[in-house]
Image (spheres, rainbow, N blue to C red):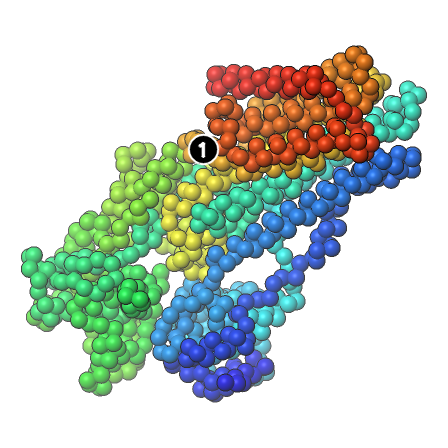
Amino acid sequence: MTVAVSPSVAAHHGREVGDVAQLLRTDPQRGLPRDEVAARRERFGPNALPPAKGPGPLRRFLRQFHHPLIYVLLGAAAVTAGLGEYVDSAVILGVVLLNAVVGFVQEAKAEAALEGLRSLVRTRAVVIREGHRETVPSDELVPGDLVVLDAGDKVPADLRLARQAELRIDESALTGESLPASKDEAVLPEAIPVADRRNMAYSGSLVTTGSGAGVVVATGGDTELGKIHRLVGGAANLATPLTRKLAEFSRILTVAILALAAATFGVGLLRGQDAAETFTAAVALAVGAIPEGLPAAVTVTLAIGVARMARRRAVIRRLPAVETLGSTTAICSDKTGTLSENQMTVQALWTPDARYEVTGSGYRPEGEFLRGGFPVPAGSDQALRWSLLGGACCNDAELRQVDGRWEVVGDPTEGAMRVAAAKAGFGTDLIAELLPRVATIPFSSERQYMATLHRDARDTTSGLVLAKGAVERVMDLCGAQLGADGTVRPLDRATVTRAAEELAGRGLRVLATAMRPAGSGPDGFDEDTLPLTMTLTGLQAMHDPPRAAAGAAVAACRTAGIAVKMITGDHAATATALAGQVGLLDGRERGGQAVLTGADLAALPAEELPDAVDRATVFARVSPEQKLRLVEALQARGHVVAMTGDGVNDAPALQQADIGVAMGAGGTEVAKDAADMVLTDDDFATIEAAVEEGRGVFDNLTKFIAWTLPTNIGEGLVILVAIALGAALPILPTQILWINMTTAVALGLMLAFEPKEAGIMTRPPREPDEPLLTRALMVRILLVSALLVGGSWWLFEWELAHGAGLAEARTAALNLFVVVQALYLFSCRSLSRSAWRIGLFSNRWIIVGVAVQAVCQLALTYLPAMNALFGTAPIGVDVWLRILAVAVATSLVVAVEKRLRRTHR
């Protein structure tokens, strides 16, 4: 079929919905046929923005040379060539090229890894196809699809609205308008700007309130967002606070070393030393003292950490979050779906005259209503009948059977009420036939109820209003309650409240239902006219069991010194019951009130709020606005806060938190956009796992830095001592370049794969302002540097004194540096424990790296071509034994230092 899609978006907002549907060959009520969807997807391609046009491969490769150290090396290569040292010049240029290639490959892999994670948090959209509502990935939408919008959704494509109810959309990202735009379906003039097109919903904008549905008129790069995207483009930025800090450190160090090298060169000339040799020594000092591979290694380590977290279902959207996770001190978690399963089942019903237990579990519509232990038909109690009908009709979820398995599309709470009604024989098709919906007041976090207007199919002159929601809010709408025989009597608010508290005390979530006869039209159907006009029909209590791993995850976090706080909109009794089940209320709470409600928070003076929030564990009946206050209060107490959220109004709290955590399965697109991390399984245990991985990543970064700095400092000091003594250089500049580049790749990067240490979640969180290298680590780094300098000078002088040539002595000193680094690498696998206690083969990449480095060293020492290129010479077995003795002695000194530090803690 040929689809006539107008190239002008203005034509869509300037046409009636029916005309747009006809133009796109679609049905504005039933949507597209499935075979037509497949044909259009083939023609129009995926509904995705074209990949961002970042710098090309050549530019990215040339960017590797844009670093102060590289400028120094290029200058050194030019000067050495001018002095006739062509081999040295060629080696320096070769190492610069190798460094650029390694950096280019590492950066490409890191960017590819982050880009690949986007598929794990694919946006989803609700569509109607062939009259059936279904959820599909947004990139599968095609022109002509009928898309359903609800509060919290990100608009997945450009839509011409077909219907709406109090729909307001935040289009600030597109138009710059700070306030959400109200929407309607009216035809507009064609010559009207995007910001004024009230009958359009644009891709990338966010639904703040209300609901609606619209026909897709543009997808992917043809949307208004796509046009902007083509203009601006852009690529992912891999910089983090840590990498920026290290880059700045490298720049400062480069300037300092250049100044020291220049001073060294001047002193050498004043002492009458050969200019070429003195310059060579100054270059060696500069090259040796700077850890040139550090920024790239840090980026790779972070990228590996991101991949590890993704495998544990935590998708990092912003790379700095990896660092912050390691110092998280408080986790504020939602209850529903995060600490609990979010698989609701109605277990009990209360009506003004009776109580019922409901059998069956899950979404299978099979079960009975028991009164006093005996099954009763739902029609025997009019209040029960209307409570079930109210829960099922005032409902946007859909219950369906797929491949023999029952599932719910929509909110699990609404799904549970659908299932309860189906157990009584009130199926979806029957309800739609008997009580077709006319209008809706959608649920919102502020309103806390949903109401629908229905027409009685058997009597078109009459209608019915049904409502469901939080018990307190529904009672505010009611002035009466319904008896089992259908009689209406005044509302007994105290009795209803006691019944709700009793059910909530069993750990059940309680919603109230109500009804009211109405005229045939929507006149008078709004939230201003509903209060005190409705009749309460009953309470439905449902159970959402705790997740299997939640208790262990909560215990692990508390052992790690992380405060876990539950935040929910549910009743305090319901929240308290679940908190007890997952171990949040186990008697370990500090003094103060362990459970606070939203009303309690509102009543607290501002100066008392931080202390009260810090002491409390459970927060019930909390509004989204209060979540922001909770985060700010905890931060005021010095906490690094991770906050979970899934709703549109959670976005401010997620942005304020140090780590915003959105729900990938049940969260809104608004929440995901505001978050630093997305949980693909919505499980609290995944947050605990992400914190654990974050600590592991930071540990590995620290280990790498603690491993590489002694070599750089030692190389610089060896050259400095040689100049000060007027002696021959123990190591040449080209040899230093060899050490730095080969060991960084073959040895240092292997620490990025280091598994997490045992007990990583039994130590307190790292202080946010704690320096990267503690005083203890700096002492160890200087100790190893001193041992390297002393050992290399001793070996160099020993070899010369016992008849070795200069090349052999330098080869011995060079190999000493590498062997010490290799053995020290094993020590750095744990900064506090003995290398033997963590297992020699627990990181096999270390063994592979050492083997590769050993082969490289043997080639450097014994291959004639390498001897000529790097000024090395073959050495005997006795020299290797002396090298090994010094390296083992260094390792023993470090082991003793570790032991002494553990003993004096």
Classify mark 1: residues with Cα within 10 Å, few (<14), some (14-19) or many (20+).
Answer: some
Helix, strand or loop status at disc 1? loop
Q: Residue furthest top?
A: 801
Q: Is residue 100 left or right of residue 746?
A: right
- Visible in this render: residue 62? yes
Seen at 81% across and 23% down, the residue is: 807
Across and down, in percent, residue 334 comes to 36, 50
Seen at 16% across and 59% down, the residue is: 358
| Count of marks, rendered view | 1
Relative to 289, say whether 577 is above or below.
below
Across and down, in percent, residue 321 comes to 52, 45
Q: Is residue 867 left or right of residue 219?
A: right
- Visible in this render: residue 185? no
Across and down, in percent, residue 891 comes to 59, 20
Relative to 753, say whether 798 is above or below.
above
Seen at 50% across and 67% down, the residue is: 139
For badge 1, the amino acid type reads Ile
Q: Is residue 788 left or right of residue 201?
A: right
Relative to 783, say whether 96 is above or below.
below
Seen at 19% across and 61% down, the residue is: 539
Q: Is residue 210 left or right of residue 709?
A: left
Name the residue tied to disc 1: 760
Across and down, in percent, residue 640 comes to 47, 40
> Considering depth in this image, is 399 or 249 the residue closer to the camera?
399
Relative to 148, say whether 338 is above or below.
above
